[in-house]
Image (cartoon, grey):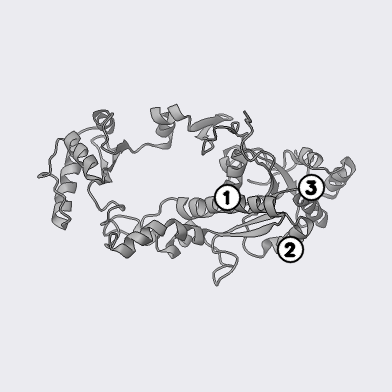
């Protein structure tokens, strides 16, 4: 059994950035690709200072610190790109071209290269050069307008939907598809992964529900947005919460039986009055006991009930523990790589390293001579591992 992961043998260059691009690179590294980060000597990020070991999306890969304002560093980067299968960058449109590392020179050096570009608004369009964040991209898809409680402003679902689901995951899918094509046809290409595009795509099923008239009310009044009493979150006696997802009649029946309610207490005829009555009955009953008491009561029942856990609790939950879906890396408990591979499982990722810590070793392994490496260090094009101070 190969225990190095299904992407063993792939070489990816990652241009250091923040958010979705590093997470996409992490996913590839988790699956066995050798991903090398080109980091910068100056700090980059959101202005939130934290030690490199807490930059968890930087796990599983080594880095070379370069001053890309130095032409020798650009030449070195091109030498590495010439030996790579793919490249990931997450800058605004035009930045890589300004650095001399845009698609044209990279594909000239390596025609099989898959050049992955991660942006919020995309490489083209009126908003392409503008700044933005997850909430802005999600807002423009029409999905943010659908998320939240009735009569309340839209709820921000962390930065998961546009940044990571619409951005990172779509970029990885695109990279893998293009890498397969490059393997068969010997032809590289550019992947334009825009978070606004990917987030919109995530709403495909919801678009169908709206077109059919099933999801037609204001937010917080529909079947999948908390509008149904049997698909909602309720506060328990101890101030913690219980999620309820008993959409189908057979599950709803088990839910009501477990709560000690019947159809007369919690009717479901589609009317606003019935929804109000059912929600009040379910909420009132759940508020009578602590969260974990309800968990015990519903143990083994298909009521579609689950406790709302903190991240710390989640790592200890028996189901999560049985599946080993958390792993401890350098003392930090964090989500394990996913999905699972039966024939090519990947090892536990290495912890995030200090930017540039592996620079000289990486350059040597990727074919640069000792004399060339020394010259790059002397010119300041490459920053030695004990001097790099950039943020991940």
346 w.r.t. 66: above or below: above
The mark that comes first in sequence, 1 or 2, is 2
The mark that comes first in sequence, 2 or 3, is 2
Left/right placement of residue 213 relative to residue 126 reads: left
Dot 1 and dot 2 residues touching (CB under 8 Å): no
Q: Measured from the top left, where is residue 72 in percent x and y?
A: 83, 54
The mark that comes first in sequence, 3 or 1, is 1
Numbered tag placed on residue 382 in the rendering: 3
Dot 2 and dot 3 residues touching (CB under 8 Å): no
Q: What element carries label 3?
A: strand
- Per the image, the residue denoted by label 2 is 104
- Where is the N terminus found, in terms of image quarters? top right
* Furthest residue in direction left, as rendered: 264
Label 2 – label 3 distance at C-alpha: 23 Å
Residue depth check, mark 3 versus mark 1: number of the one nearer the observer: 1
Residue drawn at x 56%, y 29% is: 331
- Pick the front one: 246 or 76: 246
- Pick the front one: 70 or 199: 199
Left/right placement of residue 194 relative to residue 384 reads: left
- Per the image, the residue denoted by label 1 is 172
Tally the numbered discs.
3
Numbered tag placed on residue 380 in the rendering: none
Label 3 – label 1 distance at C-alpha: 28 Å
Left/right placement of residue 317 relative to residue 277 reads: right
Dot 3 and dot 1 residues touching (CB under 8 Å): no
Question: What crowding class fits label 3: few (fewer than 14 Cα within 10 Å), some (14-19), or many (20 or more)?
Answer: many
């Amino acid at each position: 059994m190969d225990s190095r992961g299904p992407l063993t043998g792939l070489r990816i260059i990652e241009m250091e950035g923040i958010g979705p691009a590093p997470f996409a690179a992490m996913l590839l590294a988790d699956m066995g690709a050798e991903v090398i980060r080109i980091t910068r000597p100056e700090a980059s990020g959101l202005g939130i200072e934290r030690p490199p070991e807490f930059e968890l999306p930087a796990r599983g890969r080594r880095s070379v610190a370069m001053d890309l304002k130095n032409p020798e560093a650009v030449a070195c980067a091109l030498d590495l790109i010439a030996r790579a299968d793919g490249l990931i960058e997450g800058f605004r449109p035009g930045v890589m071209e300004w650095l001399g590392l845009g698609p044209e020179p990279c594909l000239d050096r390596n025609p099989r290269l898959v050049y992955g570009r991660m942006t919020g608004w995309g490489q083209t369009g009126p908003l392409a050069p503008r700044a933005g964040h997850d909430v802005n991209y999600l807002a423009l898809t029409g999905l943010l307008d659908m998320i939240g409680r009735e009569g309340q402003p839209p709820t921000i679902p962390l930065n998961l939907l546009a940044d990571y689901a619409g951005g990172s995951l779509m970029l990885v899918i695109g990279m893998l598809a293009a890498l397969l094509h490059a393997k068969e046809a010997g032809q590289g290409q550019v992947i334009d992964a825009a978070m606004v595009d990917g987030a919109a795509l995530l709403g495909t099923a919801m678009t169908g529900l709206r077109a059919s008239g099933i999801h037609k009310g204001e937010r917080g009044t529909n079947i999948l947005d908390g509008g149904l009493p049997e698909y909602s979150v309720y506060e328990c006696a101890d101030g913690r919460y219980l999620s309820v997802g008993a959409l189908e009649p057979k599950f709803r029946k088990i839910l009501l039986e477990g709560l000690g309610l019947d159809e007369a207490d919690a009717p479901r005829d589609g009317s606003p009055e019935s929804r109000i009555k059912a929600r009040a009955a379910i909420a009132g009953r759940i508020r009578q006991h602590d969260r974990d008491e309800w968990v015990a009561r519903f143990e083994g029942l298909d009521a579609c009930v689950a406790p709302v856990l903190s991240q710390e609790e989640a790592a200890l939950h028996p189901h999560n523990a049985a599946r080993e879906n958390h792993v401890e890396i350098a003392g930090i408990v964090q989500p394990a790589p996913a999905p699972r591979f039966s024939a090519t499982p990947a090892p536990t990722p290495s912890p995030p390293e200090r930017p540039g810590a592996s620079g000289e070793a990486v350059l040597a392994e990727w074919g640069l001579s000792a004399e060339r490496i020394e010259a790059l260090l002397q010119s300041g094009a490459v920053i030695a591992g004990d001097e790099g101070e950039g943020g991940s």
